[in-house]
Amino acid sequence: MSVIPRRPRTTPAIALFLALTTAAAAQEAPAPSNTSPAVTAGAADAADPVDLANDDDSAPVLAEPDFRVLNLPSTLRLPRHASNFQLTHRFNGNLRRGSLGGNAGNLFGLDQGAAVGFEYRFGVARHLQAAVYRTAIDKAFQFYGKYDGVRQGGAIPVSLSALVSVEGADNFQERYSPAFGAVVSRMAGDRLAVYATPVWVHNTAALLNVDRDTVFVGVGGRVRIGGSVYVVAEVAPRIGGYQPDEPAYGFGIEKRAGGHLFQLNFNNGQGTTFGQLARGGSPNSLYLGFNLARKFF
């Protein structure tokens, strides 16, 4: 009796890996022009200086692959009618409490739940983007817009974006906190991007039934250490107003694959909105988390 060979089973993990690999491979970046950054995977190690002041907002910028650093915004432009989806995840386990063995037994926080956030971003008009973000912390919704009015290149040494935001707890029903700010960035070739983000946030002490404001200046950076691997860090010291706890800070490592970006990060708090960052991080705390982003352009 002949034996019919069985076809190998495709496990869900293998199927997911194949799907992500296919999606990433299908997103071939356009060839670089004389005025645009080196954008393709093959040009990832190009050392020539590039002019960012071009009209193609869809051209990938190697030094700035995402719309966030960790929690603070970047100056990355979103093409008109294009979009971006982002998932933020901050696990509840405090890695600075307990022993190494205890944290390992909880998979370094993975077994202790998480604060999850979802963001959808859309290019309303040229250089103008709008976003809606919802986080499990206080069931807060944040609506904000960003105008990327100035782009580094030629005689212009920095990129500049203007921010406006309003957030509210309990699904945008109470404790509203409007915010105004800006993002200033400077890129050095296609390897380094540094950011300064001054932000004013109103009603940051709403939980205490006190009318207070906070001003913070976020500082962050991103360094590309390989063709598509980056290290990132940021801190948001307060310079005025309500300043509880410690300044929020975080650091991480990320990997770009086509239109996808996966970032593994560590933060001293779980806040991701402007109001939550203004209230700072927790003393003696460190939380494992990740950001997952997908561009649709």
Image (tube, rainbow, N blue to C red):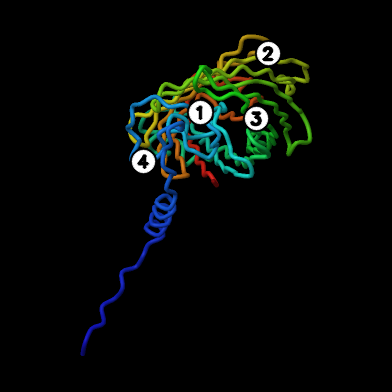
Extreme top residue here?
A: 240
| Numbered disc in front, either 4 or 3 | 4
Which-is-in-front pick, marks 3 and 2? 3
- Residue under label 4, please give it: 41
Q: Residues within 10 Å of mark 1 (few under 14, many from 20)?
A: many
User: What residue is shown at x 69% (from left), y 36% (from top)?
Assistant: 141
Q: Amino acid at mark 4?
A: Ala
Q: What's the mark number on residue 294?
A: none
Mark 2 or mark 4, which is nearer to you? 4
Q: Which residue is mark 2?
A: 242
Q: CA distance from mark 3 to mark 2?
A: 25 Å
Q: In terms of sequence position, does the residue under pointer 1 or pointer 3 come before the other?
A: 1
Q: Amino acid at mark 1?
A: Val
Q: Amino acid at mark 3?
A: Lys
Q: Residues within 10 Å of mark 2 (few under 14, many from 20)?
A: many
Left/right of residue 49 with respect to residue 148 in the rendered view: left
Q: Which residue is mark 3?
A: 146
Circle number at residue 69: 1
- Please tell me which of labels 2 and 4 falls first in the chain: 4
Q: Are marks 2 and 4 in contact (CB under 8 Å)?
A: no
Residue sitting nearer the eye, 58 or 286: 58
Q: Earlier in the sequence, mark 1 or mark 4?
A: 4
